[in-house]
Image (cartoon, rainbow, N blue to C red):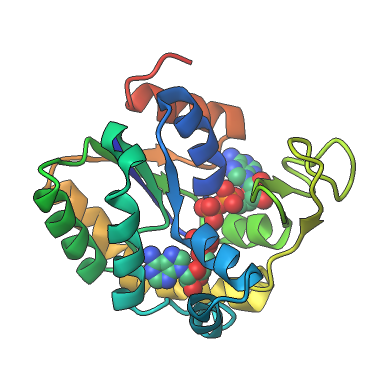
Amino acid sequence: MRTILLGPPGAGKGTQAEVIVKEFQIPHISTGDIFRENIKNGTELGKKAQEYMDKGLLVPDELVVAIVEDRLKKEDCKKGFLLDGFPRTLPQAEALDNVLKDMNVTLNKVINIEVAKEKLIQRAVGRRICRQCATAYHVDFNPPEKEGICDKCGGELYQRADDTEETISKRIEVYLKDTKPLIKYYQDQDILVTIDGEKDIKEVSKAVVQTLGGES
Ligand code: ADP
Ligand code: AMP
């Protein structure tokens, strides 16, 4: 299974990614997670990315494409992969098509998760992330059993610096301008499926897994 999760910030891509990778046993490639891991480890890449992320802007295409290209060439991607948060611009999508062509593979499906703007802000502002395993929770919609602690690994939960109302509004603006055109790009390739992301997490998961031909 080779697939992409498309959708605005806060739509639920990371949340659904967990279910998909479990069902299909494929690696989860989240460019946002890769950048946050680099920031945590104080790498040069992390320093460069943070300048853009803190402002709600996109990291330049060259940087992101190089990272994804390297990652897709790793052995574990031979069985498939799930891209989450990439591509986010037309040049990224075109670069991905070239990488896949070199690898002699094609995408199976692109899942577009649709959620209204007011809900996106509410979701992002209440989001809490595990410092250790990056699992996302929500203070109201998906709270952990013990406040501030990850159910899965016991790690500490934190609020992302870019999950303020102001930065999330900027990120939505950037999404509308740079990323939304990808819906048509993948519609034209006949591989796009749009899913209502406003239902509760379990219902969205069911629709996503069914669309991808899974069983749970
Ligand atoms: P994305 O990866 O698209 O930015 P996340 O998966 O991190 O989005 O989800 C954003 C926030 O919304 C998280 O706090 C998550 O727990 C919550 N969330 C995800 N899906 C739903 C849903 N269907 N209903 C309510 N809250 C959701
Ligand atoms: P996310 O975790 O997907 O919400 O991404 C957080 C931030 O990381 C974004 O607001 C961007 O600054 C940066 N980022 C993640 N993926 C990409 C991408 N494909 N292209 C450019 N910037 C990205």
Residue 200 visible at all = no
* Residue 98 higher or lower than 170, as above or below: above
Q: Residue at x 16, y 50 (%)?
A: 100
Residue furthest to the right: 146
Residue furthest to the top: 215
Residue placed most toward the observer, 141 or 32: 32
Residue placed most toward the observer, 77 or 188: 77
Q: Residue at x 36, y 38 (%)?
A: 76
Residue placed most toward the observer, 108 or 117: 108
Q: Quadrant of residue 123?
A: bottom right
Number of numbered discs overlaid on the protein picture: 0
Q: Residue at x 33, y 27 (%)?
A: 212
Locate residue 107, reporting x and y percent: 20, 41
Locate residue 19, reporting x and y percent: 52, 31
Q: In the image, is 162 to the left or to the right of 188?
A: right
Q: Residue at x 27, y 59 (%)?
A: 69
Locate residue 185, reporting x and y percent: 18, 56
Residue furthest to the front: 75
* Residue 79 higher or lower than 135, as above or below: above
Residue 137 visible at all = yes
Which image quadrant: the N terminus?
Answer: top left
Q: In the image, is 154 to the left or to the right of 124?
A: right
* Residue 209 higher or lower than 62, as above or below: above
Q: In the image, is 190 to the left or to the right of 89?
A: left
Q: In the image, is 135 to the left or to the right of 144?
A: left
Locate residue 92, reporting x and y percent: 25, 66
Residue placed most toward the observer, 63 or 57: 63
